[in-house]
Image (cartoon, helix red, strand yellow):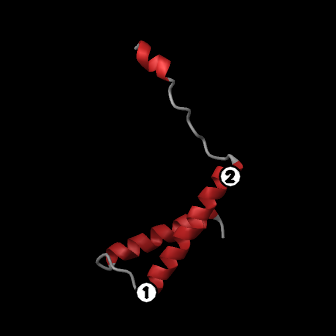
């Protein structure tokens, strides 16, 4: 399953959740939890592969001089 498919399905489930007065059926809740786990695993993979932009914190010297 591709990452964009996971995000699209999560978005569809959230729309359904809102239309159902903020309640999931048991099947929808299981599907949502599975999709969230897949998304978290994929994001963790991005971090492991170094495909995520990480900013460096400002040095304390620059902050003290200002």
x%, y% of residue 36? 52, 68
Where in the figure is residue 22, as x and y percent of width and height?
Answer: 31, 75
Q: Residues within 10 Å of mark 1 (few under 14, many from 20)?
A: few
What residue do we see at 60% from left, 41% from top? 53
Observer-side mark, 1 or 2, equals 2
Which residue lies most toward the bottom here?
A: 26
Determine the secondary structure under disc 1: helix
Q: Residue farthest to the right?
A: 49
- Identify the residue under disc 1: 26
* Vertical side of 53 occupied by 35: above or below: below
For the point 54% across and 64% down, which residue is it? 7
Q: CA distance from mark 1 to mark 2?
A: 33 Å
On residue 48, the disc is 2
In the picture shown, does residue 55 fall above or below 24?
Answer: above
Q: Residue furthest left?
A: 21
In this view, the residue in front, 14 or 61, is 61
Between residues 19 and 3, which one lies in front from this camera angle? 3
């Amino acid at each position: 399953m591709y990452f964009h498919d996971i995000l699209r399905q999560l978005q569809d489930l959230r729309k359904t959740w809102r239309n159902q007065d903020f309640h999931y059926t048991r099947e929808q809740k299981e599907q949502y939890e599975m999709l969230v786990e897949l998304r978290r695993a994929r994001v963790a993979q991005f971090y492991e592969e170094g495909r995520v932009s990480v900013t460096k914190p400002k040095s304390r010297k620059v902050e003290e001089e200002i």
